[in-house]
Image (spheres, rainbow, N blue to C red):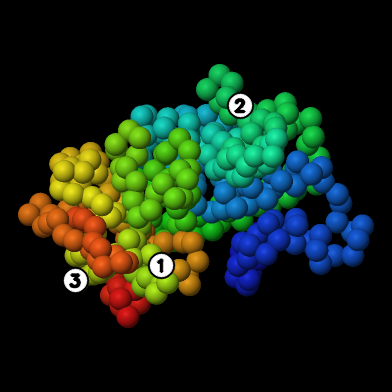
Amino acid sequence: MLDFVEQGGRDPYSFVRQKKSFYGFSKSVENEGLVPQLDSRLEKILEAFSKYVLNGKYFEEIEIVARLLQGMPSGVADLAAASPWSSKEASVKARFKAAVANLNLEFRREQVKRDGKTELVTIGENLGMRLFQVENDRVVFHQDLLDVWTDVFAEQLADLCAAAGRIFHKNLDLEFYSGGLIRYRKYDRGDVFRSLLWDENPVAQNVGGYLISPDRSNCPIFVTYDKRDEIASTIKYEDAFIDPQTLVWFSKSKRTLDSPEIKYLRDLDSEQRLPLFVKKSDDEGISFYYLGDVVPVKDSFTQESMPIEGGKSVSVVKLLFRLKHSVPEALYNYLVA
């Protein structure tokens, strides 16, 4: 994968989207026997890491794996020294904890069938093994992983890590950085919740257009600008930009000015974040542009009625969000066109 990054050709993660990992892609195009076989668990680890862990979005995971592969210590102090952003102890410790959980595949979940029932479990739980552990405040490979470790797996992991690191630093712009996110870069919902240090990736249907974090420190907001004609009227909100720094926004249906999340927005303090993510339409896929954090305009909250099927209506709250940074002209024109 690193070769493709350095040569500036095909997006190396296109192989991940096509065959789950570069290793999987290599197996699909090479003659049988030319690509060494991996234990099925190692292959699944490469697939999960390619998509969710070493995907070029998270500095901490990249740094930890790179240091371990080079035999270097990988603890909180080591991350703080290498971090391109905040070295505040509390911030680094929180990111270290989140990174270790993600490295153990404890953040994202997948559906499995057990006893005839479908359950949601973490990828790590379904894998049935630990990958990393913390000893003396430093990350080390877990014995479960070392027991199945091979040179082929090490080569694939090193290549993936190097490619992820190169892409991360290529996209890094500290001027646009804010609390784990870089303005105008694209993130899927899972990327967002991991970057905001949630303990687990919430179920998509529970998110809708926004969800307040369990610790109430943040509430990411997701907007699909052009709604599909066939979606239900109860979720067909008319969110729209007034200008590059102002967005008209609607709450979920059946909310009033007294609803808990509306009170949260109205009483927002300076330590609570509202990161805004927008995509033009569902045709773009699952990723959103991070446009920066927003603040509600205090006197803009109004309760309105939204028509739905059958001639009925439901309550909804309308308000204005003010972006802390104006959307760049080219991106703004693309989104609203």
Q: Amino acid at mark 2?
A: Gln
Does 328 sit left or right of 257 as displayed? right
User: Which callout, 3 or 1, points at the residue further toward the start of the chain?
Assistant: 1
Q: CA distance from mark 1 to mark 2?
A: 45 Å
User: Which callout, 1 or 2, points at the residue further toward the start of the chain?
Assistant: 2
Disc number placed over residue 335 in the picture, else none: none
Foreground disc of the pair 3, 1: 1
Q: CA distance from mark 3 to mark 1?
A: 24 Å
Disc number placed over residue 242 in the picture, else none: 3
Residue in view at x 79 percent, y 34 percent: 148
- The residue at the far front in this view is 310
- From the viewer's perspective, is residue 308 above or below residue 195? below
Q: CA distance from mark 2 to mark 3?
A: 49 Å
Foreground disc of the pair 1, 2: 1
In front here: 197 or 303? Answer: 303
Disc number placed over residue 231 in the picture, else none: 1
Considering the image in quadrants, where does the N terminus appear? bottom right
Q: What is the crowding at mark 1: few (fewer than 14 residues within 10 Å), some, or many (at least 20)?
A: few
Name the residue that disc number 2 marks. 133
Tag 1, which secondary structure? loop
* Whether residue 129 is visible: yes
Q: What is the crowding at mark 3: few (fewer than 14 residues within 10 Å), some, or many (at least 20)?
A: few
Q: Quadrant of residue 226?
A: bottom left
Q: Amino acid at mark 1?
A: Ile
Q: Position of residue 323 (x, y in %)?
A: 22, 59
* Whether residue 322 is visible: no
Does 63 sit left or right of 263 as displayed? right
Residue in view at x 60 percent, y 70 percent: 8
- From the viewer's perspective, is residue 262 above or below residue 128? below
User: Which callout, 2 or 3, points at the residue further toward the start of the chain?
Assistant: 2
